[in-house]
Image (cartoon, rainbow, N blue to C red):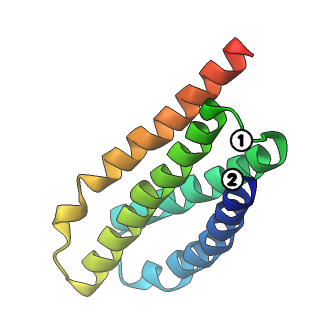
């Protein structure tokens, strides 16, 4: 599990930089400011959670169920939250209808909140 968490941390960090540059240089020309702002929010959340997962990967052993759930919630949350935002913004730029992805974003947010809530719980009971 440690290697999986570190893998996702590095992958999220790597692609967060790529997507951030893509948004700043390419999408800036084709998206309205409010849509670009949503894209930037996805990048910001992805990069923040990349750092958090990296920290967890070096400090947790993932033997405890709660430790595994914290990391899993954050990984699933980033995938659902950030990547649904990217898809929706890209669809807007290409004039493709992917509105069915709209409900995915808040579900991803719930996973992210669950991860943070579990981390808080973990720190309280330790």
Of the image marks 1 and 2, the number of the one nearer the N terminus:
2
- Camera-side residue: 118 or 21? 118
Left-right relation of 43 to 102: right
**Relative depth, front residue between 67 and 10:** 67
**Marks 1 and 2 close (CB-CB < 8 Å):** yes
Count how many numbered circles sit on residues in the image: 2
Q: Residue at x 74, y 53 (%)?
A: 2
- Could you classify mark 2 by the number of other residues whose Cα lies within 10 Å: few (under 14), some (14-19), or many (20 or more)? some
The quarter of the picture where the C terminus appears is: top right
List the residue tagged with mark 1: 62
Kindly identify the residue that appears in the image at 17 percent across and 63 percent down. 100
Examine the rendered structure and indicate whether residue 41 appears above or below residue 68.
below
Q: Position of residue 81 (x, y in %)?
A: 41, 55
Task: Name the residue tied to disc 2.
Answer: 1
Residue displayed at 61% across by 19% down: 121
Compare residues 6 and 63 and report the one nearer the observer.
63
Please tell me in which quadrant of the rendered image residue 15 appears.
Answer: bottom right
Identify the residue at horizontal 33%, vertical 46% (top origin).
107
Q: Which mark is residue 18?
A: none
> Considering the numbered disc 1 on the image, is that residue within a helix, a strand or a loop?
loop
Up-down: is 40 above or below 91? above
Mark-to-mark CA distance, 1 and 2: 6 Å
* Spot occupied by residue 96 in the image (x, y as percentages of width and height): 19, 81
Q: Is residue 111 left or right of residue 91?
A: right
Work out which residue is located at the far right of the displayed protein and give it: 58
Label 2 residue SS: loop
Up/down of 35 relative to 115, above or below: below
């Amino acid at each position: 599990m440690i290697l999986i968490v570190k893998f996702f941390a590095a992958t999220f960090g790597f692609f967060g930089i790529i997507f951030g540059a893509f948004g700043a240089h390419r999408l800036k020309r084709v998206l309205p400011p409010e849509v670009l702002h949503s894209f930037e929010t996805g990048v910001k959340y992805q990069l923040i959670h990349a750092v958090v997962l990296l920290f967890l990967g070096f400090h947790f052993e993932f033997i405890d169920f709660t430790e595994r759930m914290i990391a899993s919630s954050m990984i699933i949350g980033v995938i659902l939250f950030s990547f649904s935002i990217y898809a929706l913004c890209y669809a807007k730029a290409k004039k493709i209808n992917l509105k069915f992805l709209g409900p995915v974003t808040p579900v991803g947010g719930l996973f992210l909140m669950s991860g943070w809530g579990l981390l808080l719980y973990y720190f309280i009971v330790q």
